[in-house]
Image (spheres, rainbow, N blue to C red):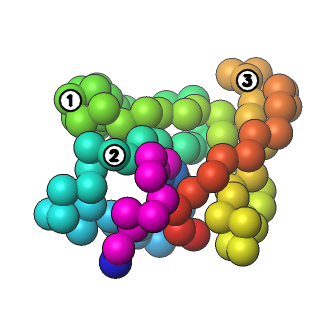
Amino acid sequence: MNLSFLGKLTANFLYTTKLLQCYSWTTNGKRGRANVMYCTPANFMFGVKAYNKPLEDICDKRSIIRHYGYTLVEVKPHDREAIFDVKNVKGELVEKKTMKVCHT
């Protein structure tokens, strides 16, 4: 897939039931242009506590941005946008955030 027309990329990876992969970015040399984000409605990275620290370390090493308290509420495929409800640690809605994505 040729993504050169997009310029700087943003990828959102969500804690969902489906596996999302952008493996070709690394193999095709596109990873350096991509902002990779992991968004989850939880206040932690992973449901198994023992894995959180190692996963956080991997994210730090690979410059993966984490967003906690982000719940995906809408996808606008034609506009290439993902809309999130953002909540604080108390579960209170703080804002709605729209992010541009390269694919949905």
Badge nearest the viewer, 2 or 1: 2
Q: Which residue is mark 3?
A: 88
30 vs 34: above or below: below
Q: Is residue 13 above or below residue 45?
A: below
- Front residue of 67/16: it is 67
Magenta part of the chain: 2-10
Disc 2: CA contacts within 10 A as few (<14), some (14-19) or many (>=20) = some
Occupied quadrant, residue 19: bottom left
Q: Choose the circle earlier in sequence order: 1 or 3.
A: 1
Image side of residue 94 versus residue 65, left or right? right
Instruction: Decide: few, some or many residues near mark 1? Use Cα within 10 Å; few <14, some 14-19, many ≥20.
Output: few
Circle number at residue 61? 1
Q: Residue at x 53, y 68 (%)?
A: 103
Instruction: Assign a secondary structure to mark 3.
Output: loop
Residue at 37 percent across and 63 percent down: it is 4
Q: Earlier in the sequence, mark 3 or mark 2?
A: 2
Asked which secondary structure carries label 2, the reply is helix
- Does residue 49 show up? yes
The percent coordinates of residue 65 (x first, y second) are: 43, 33
**Crowding near the residue tagged with mark 3, few <14, some 14–19, many ≥20 C-alpha atoms within 10 Å:** some
Where on the picture, by quarter, is residue 88? top right
Q: Tell me the distance, in whole angstroms, between the alpha carbons under discs 3 and 2.
A: 30 Å
The quadrant the C terminus occupies is: bottom right
